[in-house]
Amino acid sequence: MIKRIRCLFVVTLIALLSPIAMADRHLEAGGYLSSNTVLDDSFAFFTQHKMVLNQWGVDLRAEVLDVKDTLHLLPLISYRYATSDGSPYIGGSEMGTTLNAHEVDAGLRGRVWFLPWMGGFAQLQTGITHVQMKGEIDNHGQTGMYNRYSGNTNEWNLGATMGVEFRISPWQMERMGIKRFNFGGEIGVGFVKRTAANFTPTLEGGDDLSLPSVQTVDFGNLDLTGVVFQLGMTISFL
Amino acid sequence: MKRNAIILFILWALLCGCETPGIYDNYAPIRYTTVQLRQGIVLQDRNTDELSLLQVTAKNVAKRVLFTPQEGEYVDSFFSGHDGDSSGRLFVLTYVGDVRRSDVTPALHVIDVQTGNSATISLSSAFSKYRFSPDGQALILYHDDSENSSRSLSNPNEIAIVYLGSIEVQLTQGILKSTGTVLKTMSVDLKGSTIEGIHFLDSVVIGSNEKNLVAFATVGAIHLVDLYNADAPSVAVSLKNDTDSRRIVAQQFELIKGTMTHGPRIFVQADNASELYDIELNPRDNAAGFYATTSLLDGGTTPSDFAVLQDAGELFVVSASSQSSVLNIFEAATARITTVNLTSRVHTIESRTVNGRTELVMYGAGSNRIYFLNETDIGREMGDNLETLILQENIDGAQLLDNDRMLIYPGDDGLVLVDMSSRTVTHLAGRSSEDWMNNQLWNNTLFLTGYNRVDFLDVRQGTTGQVALDEAILQFHIFPAQRVGIAVHDTPTGRATMFPLASPNRANCRVFDGFLVSGILNRGEE
């Protein structure tokens, strides 16, 4: 039995690897706008109206492998930045809140070109999200009053995205005499799971004479997991 | 073209995302109430009616939930027990929000703060008024004219007596076990009136039966009920004729127990009545009941306060009126009056004990005189032994500190201490903008709240000081059991500054922040 499994494994590997070509190696750089629809209602604490965390970022990809000249594999690294402001009511007054998220991921994209100018992709990535949260209340001119809360956490994330890519047809580029350069775009949807971020901030403000608080307050946990809709532009070169 | 427009619209919608659920929009604040218990201050959530306790210990301030109304139930009022700020019990009256519900009834909830145990007593109607007996063993619930009639019909004759001793085990041990009657609902024939006030009288022996009388004051009458024998008929005592249009409402009661020379009686002073009422309590022939006979003591002026003195077995009633500068002394047995002329008007009569005898201390607003009248030989002296203490300032208000000392709040601000045993006067604080009348007293130290500071004054030594804080004070509370003072600030996140009462200074202050927002981000999980 084991022998049979071993034989099957070797045959599959040969079948997969044999058509792999080191064809068309190139780098790609992309710029992105990703809209995360956050599922945790508590995100309303850091947003004015919409439960959306808009990320701006860049990806760097390298096509290193393709399978049967059809499936193209591109490992990638990405960076996303998001900021969101809110004004929740607490105790009858508004608190000005800010959330900044820096996300650095590594992943793998698989791509298939159905047409010379259009294809589909699926991508898996994981990384770390650094979340900074701030809150400020009005001190009404009382300079001795501590009125700013700030804290940050690092959370893991795991995401998957799939969508459609577009590019200028390579034949067209060749006719224009442009080699090893292309330009395109993409639309994708996906899901990102992030571990909950806990906000236990330090209290700041006041002046040199202010009495510090003897206890820190735990605001609780915020889960930034959400559905992603992504728009991007890609430049491929080299 | 149309296809492109549709695609663009879908893309825009996806980018825009969804509206927030608004869980932090228009969030009604948690209200710091003035209901103080031994363990802390009661907070109320205006959205949910949930009641929490801002629990104060010697080293910590934290918030915990005390009472959550069930669905369909709304909080009408809540209050501490009979001992006020020292009480460890919270009482909550609830009513039915949606009258279509049959599973929810008006109720009284009693919560023991220490143990968290509670007892719920279903009521026959939504009472809005209450009075505790002085010993805390009974709570009377009743209706008055000010009730919200849109909630339900209510019978003004209806009262409920809650015997708190019967639920003691449930509250302290959490065991559902009542040791006797918990609730007695009854109807007192108020002759078409509503209850204006309730007055608990001491226990008294009438004939051979001991009774714990409660007086229900209505317009023109009082109704006497035996608190622990509520099935016995009430006794109505009229204070005026049917043709008398005055709005006479009994305000002050003094019960005198029977002696060898006189039977038990109640002296009553009423609003809009120029007479004092001398109500004798007489046993009925059937032994269990009693009846009342009334005499009038009329000095010609409307009394504002009175006191009863005893000398050689005889009763003497001393009454003062804010309308005239006289003191009337009545011999109760004969209604004979002796009028003592004063230099100024008197509206308040206090009493103290000197060598086992009663001494009256009398003063009036706007006057600079305090009068003293000792019970000893009152029958012989009839006011000739009246003593007068003259102050430099006019009296705006006064507060008895103990048997021998009284604080005077002069009309032009400041603070004066009167030693009543030595008849001496000490100026504790000069003229200032401080309104010392709104002080809180702890162990001979007065605490007064300012904008962002707490001033204090040691009455014994006359020394003053202040504790300056970093932000405005919303409320200030003293917790004698924990020996700390708490200044609650109006900070939305919840903030309080604590200092020891024995050494109030800024260096000893401790700030507790965030007790109103702890876990606020977990709201999305609820």
Image: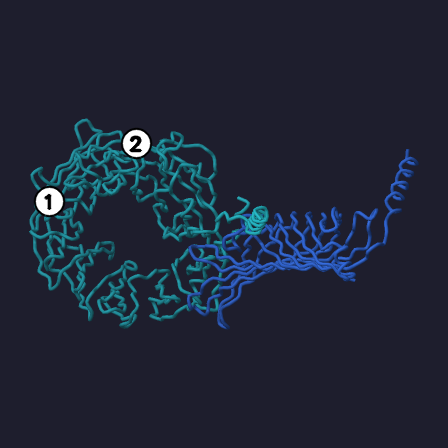
Chain colours: A blue, B cyan
Residue B130: x %, y % from top left:
30, 42
Residue B225 higher or lower than A158, as above or below: above
* x 53%, y 66%: residue: A204
* x 30%, y 61%: residue: B438
Q: Residue furthest front?
A: A175
For label 2, count other residues whose C-alpha is less than 10 Å away and answer few (under 14), some (14-19) or many (20+). some
Visible residue check, residue A121:
no
Q: Disc 2 or 1, which lies upstream in sequence?
A: 2
In the rendered image, the quadrant that contains the N terminus of chain A is top right
Residue B486 higher or lower than B433, as above or below: above
Q: Chain ID for label 2? A: B
- A50 with respect to B457 (left or right): right
Residue A75: x %, y % from top left:
77, 54
- B229 with respect to A167 (left or right): left
Numbered-mark total: 2
| Amino acid at pointer 1 | Arg
Viewer-nearest residue: A5 or B310: A5
Say which of marks 2 and 1 sits in front: 1
| Amino acid at pointer 2 | Thr
Q: Look at the numbered discs 2 and 1 and tell me whether their residues touch, using CB distance below 8 Å.
A: no
Residue A2: x %, y % from top left:
90, 36
Residue B43: x %, y % from top left:
42, 50
Q: Which mark is residue B185?
A: 2
Q: Which mark is residue B246?
A: 1
* x 7%, y 56%: residue: B339
Q: Residue furthest top?
A: B286
Q: CA distance from mark 2 to mark 1?
A: 31 Å
Viewer-nearest residue: B375 or A218: A218
